[in-house]
Amino acid sequence: MQAKKKLHALGRRIVLLPIFLFGVLLSAAAINVSSGSPSMTWAELLGVIFSNVGSELQRTVIWEMRIPRIVLGLMVGMLLGAVGTLMQGAMNNKLAGPELLGVSSGASLVMAAITVLHLPISVMLHPFLALLGGLAGGLCVVLAARGSRGTVGMLLIGMSVSAILNGLLIALIALATSNDVNLLYTYLLGSLANRSWEHVLHTLPWAIITLPIAFFFTRTLNMLQLGDEAAAGLGVKVLRARIAILALCTGLIAITVAQCGPIGYIALIAPHLVRALLGTLDARFILPLSALCGGILLVAADTVARLLLYPMEIPVGVWTTLLGGSFFLLQFLRKRQGGGVDV
Amino acid sequence: MSEKKRISYIYIRVRRLSLTAAVLLAGITVLLVLHIGLGKTLLTSDEVLLALFNRGGEEGYRHIVWNLRLPRALIAIATGMMLGTAGAILQAIMRNPLVEPGLVGASSGAVLFAVLWTSFSSAVWMTAVPLPFIALAGGLGAVLLVFALNVRQQSNAARLALIGMIVTAILQSVTSLFLLHGQQGLSTIFLWTFGSLNGRGWSSFAALWPWAVTGLLLAMLYARRAELLQLGDSTATGLGVAASRSRFILLLIASGLTAASVSVVGAIGFIGLIGPHIAALLVGRRPVLWFPISALFSAFLLLASDWIGQSLTLRVPFPGMENHLTSLPVGAVTTLLGAPFFLFLLRKSLMRK
């Protein structure tokens, strides 16, 4: 009886939460699209979007600048949200995230090197190279962490590898001409500014291929959450599954970094929010909603980044680090008091 | 017999200390000449020495050496000493090998307050209160915050470092927020968050040296108390030291040293980590010996890093970088040297558990 009631509540939440999230998404997107220069009233906005009226300027601004930016933000956020769930599940560590495991910095270092050194590489290949960089960064962390136990050690090792990679990045930036320095904004802080449909088109095929693959792993994730031994008992090849999931994560991150740089902490927060809201640990429900939630977080953060200090635009990565870092700290301290996370 | 033994022990210690100090001083002197010789106009060490001692040589060289390169080298030495001492103090009072000013938030807090102060205060206040005081408030606040966040649990070296790193990341993003808001360029951000010696002259040195002298003297005065604190709070109290007060004073000294160096050159990372560790290998961790050697070694290290950074920019041609103007910020070099070192220490401390 009790169990049935609980299941019922879960079912209700699973239906209601996406509706709520879509509502938030729509309002964030609407605010993002309508504000800025030129600013528009709601009537004008609806006219431009649905019936193709309005001035040439308005149409261009909306269709060529603001909407692709939102679409890209949503897509990148979704990828990041999925990454967060996958990583936290695979490592069985609720504090894992790409920015803490050297993957983001590895990928952004490669992208920065391409930009600064003017390497003649086609844009379509950039995600591949970012993937290699991310894999190298992640591999460094895994190798350095070999033999050490516990959450804190792993995270710290990840952060110090990131620090090394960022040092290299700074060296590159400092050696570059000032023109490139502004381009590199992106690769240090993460930003969605000046994105067009072209960027969306470069991201789309990757997202379409990789996101469904992520769903294949949800059952494995559920078993991995039980701990390595239990999962092995249930027939999961733990090591192989973990490597496969982490490789997939690296791929997902590489795509996002290639388009917008390392946007921190979205991947960390999204799964936590969804878990708290849903009240379940079942990865089959968490993964899609966490992806959605990540997309919304990023679009909302981007809206704030554009508008809060208008007309000055702050790279969205600054905001996400600011908010996400504080969230992480809270989470970390809370967990420790409960004795939940082993150190 | 035992008295004799004790005396010979002290004798060995003192000889070792003076030997190490002499070697380090010699190293710093040699490096100073090399460092001054390096730049767009390369000078030989003869020319440098002639110009330094005003013994003839070209007038232009003397200008370059005295007005451009000497202050920069001196600032490198001073900040190195300050950061090295600050790192040693922090490691001593926290009894934690993974600590340094940049990792417990001292540097980033100081940077944040300095940036806030320079962008929001009026001109009157700017002249009334020197920047290092404000930076000191920020640095101390950040360290206390990290402390407070860590205080409830049993002491754990890695945990404190993790909290410190996250607080640093947050403070850094707040800083870049304000810098961007104030329409400052990216170069300013890099300069503050990574630390650079580019373009520092005598005026910067004038702002720095009083702090360096006071801070280093105070650190030496309090070295004995730090030594007692290393034995643990209850022992220190038993020996007649007001443990928490001494710790706070030492923390204040460390923050002051960090803040003053940060307000002149920005947050140079990891020097305060490597210097004290290698100094401890040379003379052990007794603060009376450790602090001065750590200061000297860190000065040597920072000067060397700046030299490396400059020669990399001057000598290694990268494609597409032929017409760059700035040289590699010294903070990037120290990070590249120091982060792997941190990794090594971290592994050691994690494996031991």
Image (spheres, coloured by chain):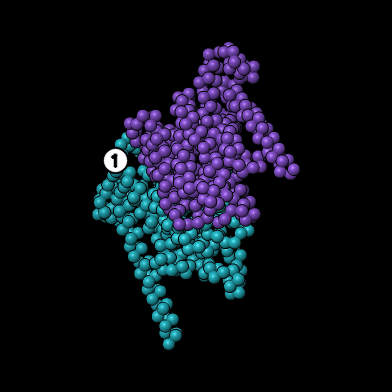
Chain colours: A purple, B cyan
Q: Position of residue B57 (x, y in %)?
A: 25, 51
Q: Quadrant of residue B60?
A: top left
Above or below, A6 relative to A60: below
Q: Position of residue A160 (x, y in %)?
A: 46, 50
Q: Quadrant of the N terminus of chain B?
A: bottom left
Total tally of numbered discs in the picture: 1
In the rendered image, the residue lying farthest to the right is: A1
Residue occupying the point 47% across, 31% down: A209
Type of residue at label 1? Answer: Pro
**Left or right side of A113 for A85:** right
What residue is disc 1 on? B317
Q: Position of residue B136 (x, y in %)?
A: 55, 53
Above or below, B88 relative to A241: below
Q: Chain of mark 1?
A: B
Q: Quadrant of residue A126?
A: top left
Above or below, A245 relative to B255: above
Q: Is residue B227 visible?
A: yes
**Left or right side of B240 for A109:** left
Above or below, B89 relative to A281: below
Q: Is residue A316 visible?
A: no
Residue occupying the point 44% across, 81% down: B6
Residue occupying the point 51% across, 47% down: A235
Q: Which residue is at the front of the view, B260 or B291?
A: B291
**Left or right side of B123 for A246:** left
Q: Which residue is at the front of the view, A263 or B52?
A: A263
Residue occupying the point 45% across, 53% down: A145
Label 1 sits on a secondary structure element that is loop
Q: Which residue is at the front of the view, A328 or A323?
A: A328
- Check disc 1: other Cα within 10 Å, few if <14, some if 14-19, many if 20+: few
